[in-house]
C-alpha cells in the first residue's frame, strides 16, 4: 500500500498525484502507460490501474493503437481547469522543472529541496509556499533565472534557484547550506547519469 499524499492529502497516493500532475500539466501530449511508468518509477500494472480510474472519471482520455494505450488529459472536462491549478500548486514542481532544467546548458544535476521535498517525502507540515531548487554545474545564472520565471508562471509560486559548482556539491567540507540540504529530503530533477 502506498503512503497517502502529504502534498495533497485528499489523494490516496503519491503516485496518483504524480500521474495527474504529469498528464494535467502536459495537456497537449499523449503518453503510453509504459512511458508514464518509466517516468514515474512505478510498475506498468499500477499505473494502468490508476489510469483506469482516471479514464472512468472522465479526467483522462484513452486512445488505443494496436496494443499501445495512450493517455491524454481530458481538457474539456469541467474539472480540468481547477484540477490543473491544484496539480500545479501541489505536484507541479516535479514535472515542470524536470522539463525546464535539462534544456539549460551546464546543468549537471538538479534537486528540489526544502518544504516541497519534505512534504513529498511524507513529512507533515503546511503546504509549501515556494519551491527551492539546487542546481549543480556551471549553468548561466541568467538562464536559470529565466527557467525560474517560466516555472513560476506555470506553478503560481516563487521558485528559488541556488547554483553550486560540481566540486562544491561533491565536497565533504562543512558548508552550513550543504549540510542543511543533505540532512533533509531532496527530490532529483536532473540526475548525474542523465546529464551530458
Image (spheres, grey):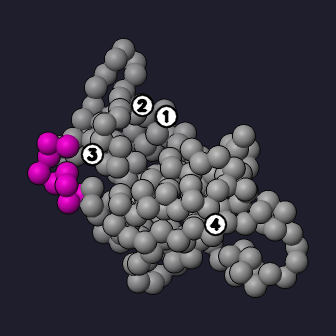
**Residue lying furthest top:** 66
Up the image or down, 179 lies above or below 103; here it is below
Q: Is residue 176 magenta?
A: no
Please report the bounds of the magenta region as a residue range: 75-83
Percent coordinates x, y for residue 12 in the rendering = 36, 63
Element type at marker 2?
strand
| Image quadrant assignment for residue 49 | top left
What residue sits right under mark 4 in the picture?
A: 134
Residue at point 50%, 40% (across, down):
37
Residue at point 40%, 48% (across, down):
22
Element type at marker 1?
helix
Badge number at residue 167: none
Q: Is residue 78 magenta?
A: yes
The reply to whether dot 1 and dot 2 touch (C-beta < 8 Å) is yes
Up the image or down, 173 lies above or below 145; here it is below
**Residue lying furthest right:** 172
The reply to whether dot 4 and dot 1 touch (C-beta < 8 Å) is no
What residue sits right under mark 3 in the picture?
A: 54
Q: Nearer the viewer, mark 4 or mark 2?
A: 4
| Frontmost residue, 158 versus 145 | 145
Element type at marker 3?
helix
Residue at point 43%, 43% (across, down):
47
Q: Distance of mark 1 from mark 2, alpha carbons?
A: 5 Å
What residue sits right under mark 2 in the picture?
A: 32
Q: Distance of mark 3 from mark 2, alpha carbons?
A: 14 Å
Q: Distance of mark 3 from mark 1, alpha carbons?
A: 17 Å
Q: Distance of mark 4 from mark 2, alpha carbons?
A: 30 Å
Badge number at residue 35: 1
Percent coordinates x, y for residue 43 in the rendering = 52, 42
Element type at marker 4?
strand
| Image quadrant assignment for residue 93 | bottom left
Amino acid at each position: 500500500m502506498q503512503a497517502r499524499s502529504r502534498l495533497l492529502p485528499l489523494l490516496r497516493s503519491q503516485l496518483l498525484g504524480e500521474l495527474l500532475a504529469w498528464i494535467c500539466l502536459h495537456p497537449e501530449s499523449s503518453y503510453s502507460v509504459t512511458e508514464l511508468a518509466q517516468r514515474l518509477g512505478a510498475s506498468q500494472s499500477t499505473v494502468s490501474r490508476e489510469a483506469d480510474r482516471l479514464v472512468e472519471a472522465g479526467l483522462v482520455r484513452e486512445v488505443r493503437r494496436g496494443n499501445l494505450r495512450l493517455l491524454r488529459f481530458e481538457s474539456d472536462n469541467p474539472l480540468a481547469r481547477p484540477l490543473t491549478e491544484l496539480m500545479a500548486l501541489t505536484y507541479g514542481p516535479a514535472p515542470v522543472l524536470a522539463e525546464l532544467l535539462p534544456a539549460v546548458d551546464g546543468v549537471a544535476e538538479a534537486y528540489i529541496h526544502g518544504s516541497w521535498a519534505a512534504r513529498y517525502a511524507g513529512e507533515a507540515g503546511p503546504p509549501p509556499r515556494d519551491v527551492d531548487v539546487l542546481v549543480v554545474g556551471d549553468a548561466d545564472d541568467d538562464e536559470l533565472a529565466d527557467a525560474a520565471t517560466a516555472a513560476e508562471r506555470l506553478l503560481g509560486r516563487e521558485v528559488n534557484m541556488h547554483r553550486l559548482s560540481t566540486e562544491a556539491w561533491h565536497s565533504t567540507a562543512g558548508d552550513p547550506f550543504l549540510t542543511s540540504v543533505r540532512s533533509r529530503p531532496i527530490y532529483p530533477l536532473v540526475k548525474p547519469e542523465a546529464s551530458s
